[in-house]
Amino acid sequence: MAFAAAIAAFFADPHLAKDAAYLSIGSAETKPVRVIAKQPDTLTSFGDAQIHSETHIFDVQASDVPAPQVGDRLTVDGVTYQVQSEPTADRERLVWTLNVVPL
């Protein structure tokens, strides 16, 4: 339980996390959540070339979003994103990582 409390503290920290709105597929109501943005750039090799691409990844607490799925939407700082691939959970199943694309 101490680890769950630490995760909750990370998401409550105003320097690490921010407010967002989550909309599940088939729902008409958005749900307020806190997210931690992880937006690393990636390098993909294609033959002799390397392609530099920007990614958009957000972590959400499983207690806020118990079953995220492809197609769900997340609005952060006025920008709406759509979940583009299967969400992944951490080992303890406390945090979901969402790979999203801006709409």
Image (cartoon, grey):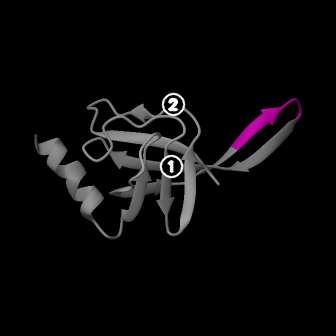
In the rendered image, which quarter is residue 3 located in?
A: top left
Q: Amino acid at mark 2?
A: Glu
Image coords of residue 75 (percent x, y): 49, 59
**What secondary structure is found at the residue carrying circle 1?**
strand
Q: Was residue 15 drawn as part of the magenta stretch in this picture?
A: no
Q: Which residue is mark 2?
A: 86
| Quarter of the image that includes the N terminus | top left
Taking depth in this image into account, of 47 and 32 the one nearest to the observer is: 32
In the rendered image, which quarter is residue 92 located in?
A: top left
**Is tag 1's residue or tag 2's residue first in the polypeptide sequence?**
1
Direction from residue 20 to residue 66 in the image, left or right: left
Q: Residue at x 21, y 57 (%)?
A: 9
Image coords of residue 55 (percent x, y): 63, 49
- Disc 1 packing (10 Å; few <14; some 14–19; many ≥20): many
Q: Which residue is mark 1?
A: 73
- Disc 2 packing (10 Å; few <14; some 14–19; many ≥20): some
Tell me the distance, in whole angstroms, between the alpha carbons under discs 1 and 2: 13 Å
Image coords of residue 60 (percent x, y): 36, 48
Is 52 drawn above or below residue 9 in the view shown? Answer: above
User: Where residue 88 is drawn, which disc sits there?
Assistant: none
Is 72 drawn above or below residue 8 in the view shown? Answer: above
Q: State which region is magenta.
A: 43-48
| Quarter of the image that includes the C terminus | bottom right
Image coords of residue 22 (percent x, y): 41, 52
